[in-house]
Image (cartoon, rainbow, N blue to C red):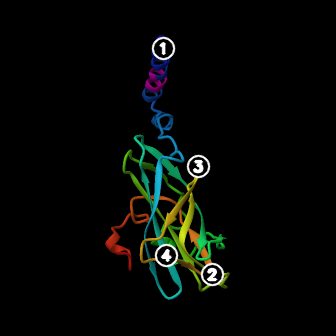
Amino acid sequence: MRRYGVFGFLLLLVVASLWVAGDRSSVLAMIQVSPCSAGSTRVTHAGGTAGMTQTEQLFWIRNVSAHECSLKGYPTISFIDLRGQGRSPTLRDQPGPTYSFYGNAHGRVVPLVDLKSRGGLASFWVVGDDSYPQSECVKSVVAKVVLPGGGRTTTVRARATELFDFCGVVSVDPIVAGVTGSIPARTLAEVPGLD
């Protein structure tokens, strides 16, 4: 017990001296939230929208643990098609116009997202664009999602009346804070076609 007291005192001294020295960024870096572990999050399908050449699917990530945790980066996604076979669509970075509404604005750094314990939310979009040369189409009601740093695959079912339907190129946007998958954050009412 005494060892922990000495360690805690030394840590307090280091933090206090950095704070006094004016290097607050170093102090904040020392107390960053730890990355989300594989079992601390649940991924769900929030819904989708579609236009003439695009289909967009919104996914929510909820922290179900008793501890705050963080995520940064892009999820990896694949699908189980209607015949039960695994399918990975052609993935690419999304440089087009949807980048300003869905996901991270073009040219911005991928954000570090802190999820509060027991309910903190983050989100991301999967955007299919069939105006590019079409690859083999994917029709699915089951997605396999791996969050950055988690290493564990989560099975996500499409909402009851929806289908993951992609032809052409598919983009996975970065994880961002909130429920709309966008920076700046928007309300769900501002997302066209999402109910």
Q: Which residues are magenta?
A: 12-17
Q: CA distance from mark 1 to mark 3?
A: 32 Å
Element under disc 2: loop
Q: Read off the residue under disc 1.
A: 6
Q: Is residue 16 magenta?
A: yes
Query: Cβ–Cβ below 8 Å for labels 4 and 3?
Result: no
Residue type at numbered disc 4: Glu
Q: Is residue 170 magenta?
A: no
Element under disc 3: loop
Query: Cβ–Cβ below 8 Å for labels 1 and 4?
Result: no
Q: CA distance from mark 4 to mark 2?
A: 15 Å
Camera-nearest residue between 27 and 20: 27
Q: CA distance from mark 1 to mark 2?
A: 61 Å
Q: CA distance from mark 4 to mark 3?
A: 24 Å
Residue type at numbered disc 3: Gly
Query: Cβ–Cβ below 8 Å for labels 1 and 3?
Result: no
Precedes in sequence: disc 4 or disc 2: 4
